[in-house]
Image (cartoon, rainbow, N blue to C red):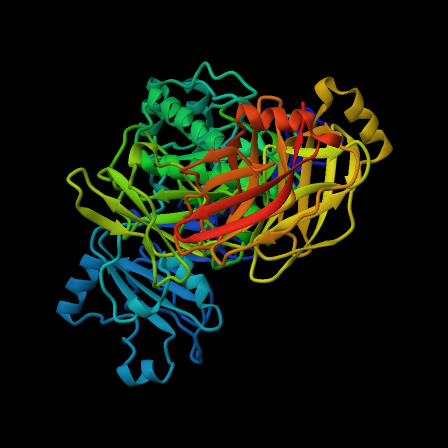
């Protein structure tokens, strides 16, 4: 996948990374297939039922189940005297014989499964020849915790399944494709199986459980036909993206249609922008534009998918190559949330491929937090194990057939005389096929809340399966039970990302139809604690300490360190500083190298990257310009009078050569502030603005423009410091401060 494989992945062109011996893998795979085919008389493949143990898929009359690979499979139609014993790990296929050869002494129960024909069971029972394989547990037994067997009827496949367990019910849950065994104890119909038999027509969005492979370039139809002799029934195909490495002359709508009809399950993959610090040297995400870039990638991926006949209801997997978690994590998560939201808005399922230790671990860390999770994970971890368990993904996350595992890579394999270099995959998740379908409507919309480094908050509403949403109404509040409407509804066509400047603790969205009818409301999503860097510029005096406005959105004060770099040079590394809740300043002194670079920069503007990191591990990174300014003489005396709802932060307002500037302020009202600003100097009003905006619990700059008289006063001010009084008013609240206006060029 892509151009790089590290960590947990080796490059196709790298010789420095150790790989498994391809010959050994082929020998092991061949031995396993020959053994299984000889002993089972049916095609089987590894599957992921229990962490740490390889599994296989067993098929019977179109019904499929995954069991540990070590379990024997007994076909009762050809061996009718086999003893169906539930005290040994085994799978029994067919109707138990009436002359079974069982040991005289057999007791106990462990994990085992019997699958028998429904019609044969019914007719046999009517004739009095045989009863149920196991009696259903009584209500008393169930209440006492004696729940060690289950029975279900799958009318669609015409089978009855009886299962038992002891210490490992999870093995049975996985095999029977159920989240809980409670609902199956009494028996009953089961949904159509998610795994499909070889050569069955593949369906859009279908879950496939079994082996797959992904080559860099899509094979021809002739090659695919030859590989019909392989154990694989799924293939990764690359749709496009800014970092697509191989040409795809074979990937056409006709190819997709033909191979879907032949039973191949497709894994559509999009190799878009990569993490800011990635392992492949690829074009990367811009941290400040991560959300918009993620949405754009999804739009392009959808267009590419539709061009080859992969319509709505299919998944598309974003290929996020390995990266160093930490500084790149916020940008990657913002990109992927927007990716998922845009795919859902168009009726597609969202998938993400990444290394277990980077992208997958980062996604897993946000599971259940309100972050907009992808529907499926494709885990790159070359451990050679053919299941979907992974140490970086808790066993309770993405459990409903939502995982793929790339277990090895860069190996040559030959089938039907055709050799292809592939990565090996084990699948238990969504795949694609020609055509489309309307995915089932989710119970309610979902909302992802992602604070941004500039203090804004990105909201990603999503409702998979619903194409009827016309607009989204943002709800916000200080508790999950006291949410009120925030602003006007936003058109759904533009709602992949809704940016708000209100730091409420909880958000939700309401979905409305074209006629204004309420369609659904998302559960409240909590805003995680975060830090932010305010302003588009940072001002540095010719000598002495500089200030950087930082927001602390946390229940307790933040303890932050600040790093400023340009290219590979570090210009600043501060010690820990306390930032009050909501915000304040960090203070730093440029290194001698930094001052030299700033002095020599064009117009004394130096492009840098600033990272502020809290002791808890949360951080914000922004690209800004450092701007030099010069003052002399003593600072004007300062004084401030704050209100409960509105506060002025800092004692210096910087003004450009054109007379525009801003006052850093904070709004703590119950609703957004719309401040008006009045600035006076030497008894004269030199600036007056109205209809500004400050979000709830947000810091921000309230802009102003000096009058001609104010501009003249500032130009003539001794030491480039004009004493002034700033008054900011919203509603009945007013904050005033004595500040110094300082010009910069």
Residue 44: x and y, percent? 44, 46
Residue 359 lies, with reference to residue 713, above or below; the image says: below
| Camera-nearest residue between 32 and 496 | 496
Residue farthest top in this picture: 249
Q: Quadrant of the N terminus?
A: top right
Q: Quadrant of residue 112?
A: bottom left
Residue 178: x and y, percent? 35, 59
Q: Is residue 299 left or right of residue 534?
A: left
Q: Quadrant of the C terminus?
A: top right
| Camera-nearest residue between 14 and 19 | 14
Q: Is residue 180 left or right of residue 37?
A: left
| Camera-nearest residue between 572 and 629 | 629
Residue 139 visible, this angle: yes
Residue 201 visible, this angle: no
Instruction: Give me the residue at 53% from left, 57% from top.
Output: 394
Instruction: Give me the residue at 49% from left, 42% from top.
Output: 456
Residue 284: x and y, percent? 59, 28
Q: Is residue 271 left or right of residue 593?
A: left
């Amino acid at each position: 996948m892509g151009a790089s494989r590290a960590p947990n992945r080796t490059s196709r062109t790298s010789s420095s990374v150790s790989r498994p011996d391809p010959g050994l893998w082929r020998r092991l795979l061949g031995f396993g297939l020959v053994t299984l085919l000889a002993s089972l008389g049916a095609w089987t493949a590894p599957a992921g039922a229990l962490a740490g143990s390889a599994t296989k898929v067993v098929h019977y009359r179109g019904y499929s189940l995954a069991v540990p690979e070590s379990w024997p499979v007994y076909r009762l139609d050809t061996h009718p005297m086999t003893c169906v014993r539930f005290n040994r790990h085994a799978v029994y296929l067919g109707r138990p014989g009436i002359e079974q050869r069982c040991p005289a002494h057999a007791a106990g129960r462990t994990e085992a499964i019997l699958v028998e024909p429904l019609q044969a069971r019914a007719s046999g029972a009517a004739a009095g020849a045989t009863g149920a394989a196991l009696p259903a547990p009584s209500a008393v037994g169930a209440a006492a915790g004696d729940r060690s067997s289950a029975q279900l009827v799958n009318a669609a496949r015409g089978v009855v399944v009886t299962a038992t367990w002891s210490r490992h019910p999870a093995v049975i849950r996985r095999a029977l494709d159920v989240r809980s065994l409670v609902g199956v104890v009494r028996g009953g119909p089961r949904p159509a199986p998610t795994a499909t038999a070889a050569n069955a027509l593949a369906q859009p969005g279908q879950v496939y459980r079994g082996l797959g492979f992904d080559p860099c370039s899509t094979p021809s139809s002739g090659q695919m036909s030859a590989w019909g002799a392989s154990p694989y029934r799924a293939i990764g195909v690359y749709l496009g993206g800014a970092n697509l490495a191989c040409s795809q002359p074979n990937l056409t709508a006709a190819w997709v249609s033909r191979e879907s009809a032949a039973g191949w399950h497709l894994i559509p993959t999009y190799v878009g922008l990569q993490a800011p610090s990635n392992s492949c040297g690829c074009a990367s995400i811009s941290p400040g534009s991560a959300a918009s870039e993620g949405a754009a990638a999804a739009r392009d991926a959808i267009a590419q998918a539709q061009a080859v006949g992969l319509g709505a209801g299919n998944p598309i997997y974003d290929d996020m190559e390995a990266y160093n978690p930490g500084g790149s994590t916020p940008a990657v998560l913002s990109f992927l949330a927007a990716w998922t939201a845009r795919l859902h808005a168009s009726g597609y399922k969202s998938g993400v491929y990444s290394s277990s230790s980077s992208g997958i671990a980062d996604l897993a860390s946000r599971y259940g937090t309100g972050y907009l999770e992808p529907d499926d994970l494709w885990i790159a971890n070359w451990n050679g194990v053919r299941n979907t368990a992974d140490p970086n993904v808790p066993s309770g996350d993405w459990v409903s057939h939502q995982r793929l595992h790339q277990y090895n890579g860069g190996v040559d394999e030959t089938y039907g005389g055709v050799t292809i270099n592939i990565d090996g995959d084990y699948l238990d998740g969504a795949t694609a096929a020609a055509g489309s379908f309307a995915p089932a409507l989710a119970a309610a919309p979902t909302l992802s809340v992602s604070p941004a480094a500039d203090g804004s908050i990105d909201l990603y509403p999503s409702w998979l399966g619903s194409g009827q949403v016309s607009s989204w109404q943002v709800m916000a509040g200080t508790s999950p039970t006291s949410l009120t409407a925030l602003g006007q509804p936003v058109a759904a066509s533009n709602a992949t990302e809704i940016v708000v400047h209100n730091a409420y603790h909880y958000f939700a969205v309401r979905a409305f139809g074209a006629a204004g009818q309420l369609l659904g409301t998302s559960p409240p999503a909590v805003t995680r604690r975060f830090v932010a860097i305010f302003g588009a510029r940072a001002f540095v005096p010719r000598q002495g300490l500089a200030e950087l406005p930082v927001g602390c959105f946390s229940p307790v004060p933040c303890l932050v360190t600040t790093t400023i770099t340009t290219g590979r040079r570090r210009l600043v590394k501060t010690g820990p500083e306390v930032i009050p809740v909501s915000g304040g300043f960090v203070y730093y002194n440029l290194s001698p190298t930094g001052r030299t670079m700033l002095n020599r920069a064009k117009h004394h503007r130096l492009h840098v990257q600033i990272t502020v990191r809290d002791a808890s591990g949360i951080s914000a990174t922004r690209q800004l310009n450092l701007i030099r300014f010069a003052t002399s003489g003593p600072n004007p005396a300062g004084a401030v009078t704050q209100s409960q709802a509105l506060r002025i932060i800092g004692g210096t307002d910087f003004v450009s050569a054109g007379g525009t500037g801003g006052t850093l302020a904070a709004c703590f009202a119950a609703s957004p502030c719309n401040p008006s600003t009045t600035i006076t100097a030497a008894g004269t009003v030199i600036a007056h603005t109205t209809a500004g905006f400050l979000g709830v619990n947000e810091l921000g700059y309230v802009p102003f423009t000096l009058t001609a008289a104010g501009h003249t006063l500032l130009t003539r001010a001794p030491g480039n410091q004009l004493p002034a009084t700033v008054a900011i008013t919203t509603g009945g609240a007013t904050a005033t401060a004595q500040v110094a206006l300082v010009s910069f060029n």
